[in-house]
Amino acid sequence: MSVATHEATPAATKPPARKSKPEIRPGLSRWLPYALVAPAVLMELVIHIIPMLVGIWMSFVKLTKFFIANWSAAPSAGINNYKVALDFDNAVGEGLLKSFGVTLIFSLVTVALSWVLGMAAAVALQPTFRGRSLVRTLFLVPYALPAYAGILTWNFMLQRDTGAVNHVLTQLGADDKPFWLIGSNALFSLITVATWKLWTFAFLTLMAGLQSIPRDQYEAAAVDGAGNLRQWRNITLPALRPVNLVLVLVLFLWTFSDFNTPYVLFGTAQPPAGDLITFHIYNASFLTWNFGSGAAMSVLLLIFLMIVTGIYLFVTGRKTRRA
Amino acid sequence: MLETKGFKAYRAVVLVVLGLFVTIPLYVMVTSSLKPLKDVQGAFTWWPSNLTIAPFIDMWKTVPLARYFVNSTIVSVVATLLSVALAILAAFAVSRFKFRGRTVFTTTVLSTQMFPGVLFLLPLFLIFVNINNQFGLQLVGTRLGLIITYLTFSLPFSIWMLAGYFDSIPRELDEAALVDGCGPMGALWRVVLPAARPGVIAVAIYSFMTAWGEVLFASVMTTEANRTLSVGLRQYSTQTNIYWNQIMAAALVVSIPVVIGFLLAQRHFVAGVTAGAVK
């Protein structure tokens, strides 16, 4: 009848408890932790892990609509699904490559914009002023809003003849009304809408990170004659480094597999300039009902994201050790 | 930070620019929901000249919005309750016990959060279809299928956040409870949980928001019977008309509960995110 004893952690310090090692005690504590994580493990297995393995299997079979209800009869496709997806001379491979390019531009620009705006706002709200909490609350609304509600509003605003965006442009003296949801402007629309939603998450996270920087560091720097810009470079940025590392990676992984924005903005008729990869795979699978091909593309997407994450962690980890 | 003139000017610019960026869509949403149909089908106007609340009444008739509402509410509430319960148990194990496989568990669970949804959408859909064929348990087109799917979406982050929260609760408190004759579960229930209440609330709101706003799986796993709001709102675009005023009214109404919930608990949420991000 005992849980592992552990040196008391003062509540004020950061919680290091998970890193330190509680002692093992015999009896209950031997099986209890397993019983406690079992339900979570079971659900993760059923909804994430097993489907992922099935997805890998699917990418090696010819799983067209004839075999959906009877998948064990689907004939093997070898690596054919991958060959088709990566053959950039045929329509399927070319489409995937273009979609990949669009997605890469989309995520890099969206992450950069979201980070810059989030940082700008977090720093602006760092010192207290009247109305600060009101502004903070307002800035968090796009994050709190269900994604589709915000995107639907943007969809309305980006309509060619009845939208607010073209109305403003006309008032500013633009001659013609551009299309925002079809044609080459679609990418621009995607970036705007995704940034609108995402920057507030960067803001939320960075603001939380700023709170942990002790005030006296700034005071000491000010005594040394450091201006705001230098304080930001020498104190704020280094202190936020761990937060930034996680934040940028998470933002990138999210935007790269963003589905909501293109789906709610364009419906199933995706313009080539707004053909983000998740959306592309979705359409390739559910419009043609060729799940084997869609699964192969999904696996390629996963491999790409894993490589990016691996390189990112390796590079940033090495820099951290050197510093 | 020195509150110099330069900083104040910088702050003013940031507040105005970002304030407008955030507010304009919200403003358009609210004002357009108060316009008659012909006004949202004509040129855009900033001010609704023919103010009407008709869209808020008509939106229930144009599409079966009430049914979507019920579906979304049941799915989100049940998924949230289950997800939070599972997360509490797992986070307690991670925070208070040393056991073989603990690191594997936390890293595996966290990495599933990073997988793109489309990766397991197709297989999960197929698994559900085949479960139905084999065992007659219908998961595509039912609320049950959505519930078990959604509860796992928020689970990894919830476990991570709650474990961080539990870590910050001094173990002396657990030990005191053990001395008083509680078992470990008693200590969780009587001591750890009450102390971690803000964290639990934050996690619950996060789970609810995740389920309430989910689009990808809802677009595949729902039929008319279990359609949720996230895909139901598309039904306002018919072949003859797009009822933008009703869409905006409905978007506003479905947003209010989550926005209020989030804003009320934002403090706990920020604390929870930091606890996670700092690690």
Image (cartoon, rainbow, N blue to C red):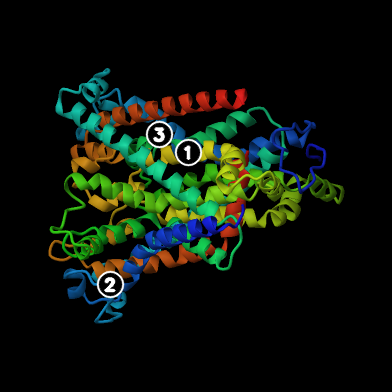
Q: Nearer the viewer, mark 1 or mark 3?
A: 1
Residue drawn at x 47%, y 45% is: B153
The reply to whether the C-beta atoms of the residues labelled 1 and 3 are less than 8 Å apart is: no
The local secondary structure at tag 2 comes to: loop
Task: Please state which amino acid type lies under the numbered disc 3.
Answer: Pro
The local secondary structure at tag 1 comes to: helix
Q: In which quadrant of the rendered image does the C terminus of chain B lie?
A: top right
Instruction: Kindly give the residue lying farthest to the right in the view shown.
Output: B179
- The residue under label 1 is A248
Q: Nearer the viewer, mark 2 or mark 1?
A: 2
Q: Quadrant of residue A160?
A: bottom left
Q: Nearer the viewer, mark 3 or mark 2?
A: 2
Where in the figure is residue A21, as x and y percent of width and height? Answer: 75, 31
Query: In the displayed structure, does residue B15 sit left or right of residue B231?
Result: right
- The residue under label 2 is B46
Query: In the displayed structure, does residue B53 sit left or right of residue A166?
Result: right
Where in the figure is residue A82, as x and y percent of width and height? Answer: 27, 22
Q: Chain of mark 2?
A: B
The local secondary structure at tag 3 comes to: helix
Where in the figure is residue A230, as x and y percent of width and height? Answer: 58, 42
Classify 10 Å Cα crowding around label 1: few (below 14), some (14-19), many (20 and above).
some
Residue drawn at x 33%, y 44% is: A259
- The residue under label 3 is A51
Query: In the displayed structure, does residue B1 sit left or right of residue A12?
Result: left
Query: Above or below — where is A48 with respect to A229?
Result: above
Task: Please state which amino acid type lies under the numbered disc 2.
Answer: Trp
Residue B228 visible in the displayed image: no
Q: Quadrant of residue A177?
A: bottom left
Task: Please state which amino acid type lies under the numbered disc 1.
Answer: Val
